[in-house]
Amino acid sequence: MRFLVLSQVFWPDNASTSQHLTDLAVALVNKGHDVHVLSSRRGYEDPAVRYRERETYRGVQVERIRQTGFGKKRNIGRMIDFLSFNLNLFLRLLFVRKGQYQVMLGMTSPPLVSFLGVHAAWRTGCRFCYWVMDLQPELAIATKVVRKGSVTAWILMWLGDLVFRQADRIIALDRFMKGYIEERGAEPAKVFVVPVWPVMTGLDEGPRESNPFRVEHGFEDRLVVMYSGNHSIVHPLDTLLDATLRLRADPRFLFVFIGGGVRKQDVTSFRKRHGLSNIQQFPYQPRELIHLSLGSADIHVVVQGEGVVGFTHPNKIYGAMFIGRPILSIGPRPSHITDILDECPGNIQVRHGEDELLARALLDFADRGRPLQEEAGRRNREYASLHFPPSRLIHQMTEELEELA
């Protein structure tokens, strides 16, 4: 079978969507399929990074499309980047011939990419699968980037509804996302739930005190509370930051932020404004080393914003549980995160704004001692190994696509 994949990001970009999509594309190649990916020539986090226009990665044919590089600093610049990618993608899809591909897979970044894809699939007679990582304009409306009830919001929602109705198959990441997509008009028989998988290439099996990332950065015996991933407006870090302020005088705690995003500067400004020495920041880590950075933490933070359950799906919970670490969840209830943690005792769950409760919970967590902390991590790892094994989930995704032919 011949597959065409449409996504702003792909290998070697470190964005989560890129890593999961790369795993899937390679798995399809390994099963004997031809896979052609259309993605962006610019880095998602840093648009100054340029990738090759054409190359083959582990059998996957990658073609990269030009786009502007204003980046995420201003909404207008980001919008221009999205529009330029979509325009060039539209022009490239005009050259796709009827019968050239059997299945087209569209992602959700940038917005409207799958609207272009479902139209191209209809024109060329191939089946279209929509892999929903997050939903726009719902997230833009929730964060007030797009005004609810505006003409822009109405047009974007209408275009999104067309994709839901026209797609031959839709992959949602959790039950809340599936329910919302069906409310928008998708046929329930077309919507399937497949969670994403941990993207690590290894596990940190050594003693805590000898973890290379921990040693390199001098964490010593402090209790490391880690947030690793995209610092997003959608998933605000304010409650966690307020807790760092409450615990500033307790030398046992170190709060580590790894990654990037539009709110990374907010963490930096908060740390400098309050003169906090219990916060350390690091850039995204290479995929081949991420098990070491994640393994250096004693507890991992997973954040989901208010009002966005069903629109987006923080997936860092899978990696943190897979390596056997406790979870600190900040967000609404219910969600896919609370669904999981309600079955795994020993983790921490608070809502946004409950920074005092969070500080007390972390003090209690520290007072438990290492044996009980590690026991919570072991339970998480057992749960993740049972429910989210990468090989099984990747195989499930390939089967969903193969069934479309």
Image (cartoon, helix red, strand yellow):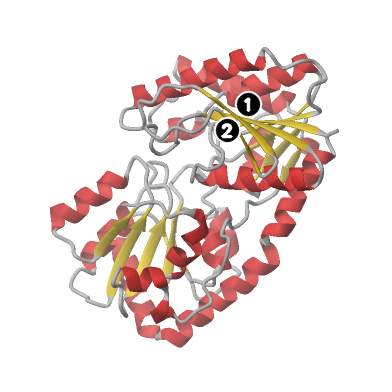
Residue 147 image offset from top left, x and y in percent: 40, 24
Q: Secondary structure at mark 2?
A: loop
**Which residue is drawn at the image coordinates 34% and 52% (left, top)?**
237
> On residue 9, which mark appears?
none
Q: Is residue 119 above or below residue 359?
A: above
**Which residue is drawn at the image coordinates 57% and 30% (left, top)?**
39
| Mark 2 lies on residue | 108
Q: Secondary structure at mark 1?
A: helix
**Residue 29 visible within the image:** yes
**Residue 349 visible within the image:** no
Q: Nearer the viewer, residue 366 or 57?
A: 57
Q: Is residue 222 above or below residue 141?
A: below
Q: Is residue 61 above or below residue 304?
A: above
Amino acid identity at mark 1: Ser
Residue 290 image offset from top left, x and y in percent: 48, 60
Is label 2 in contact with label 1 (beta carbons under 8 Å)?
A: yes
Instruction: Say which label, 2 or 1, has the lower sequence index.
Output: 2
Q: Nearer the viewer, residue 359 or 50?
A: 50
**Around disc 1, counting alpha carbons within 10 Å, would you say few (fewer than 14), some (14 to 19), or many (20 or more)?**
many
The answer to which image quadrant residue 225 occupies is bottom left
**Which residue is drawn at the image coordinates 34% and 57% (left, top)?**
257
Residue 288 image offset from top left, x and y in percent: 52, 58
Amino acid identity at mark 2: Thr
| Mark 1 lies on residue | 114
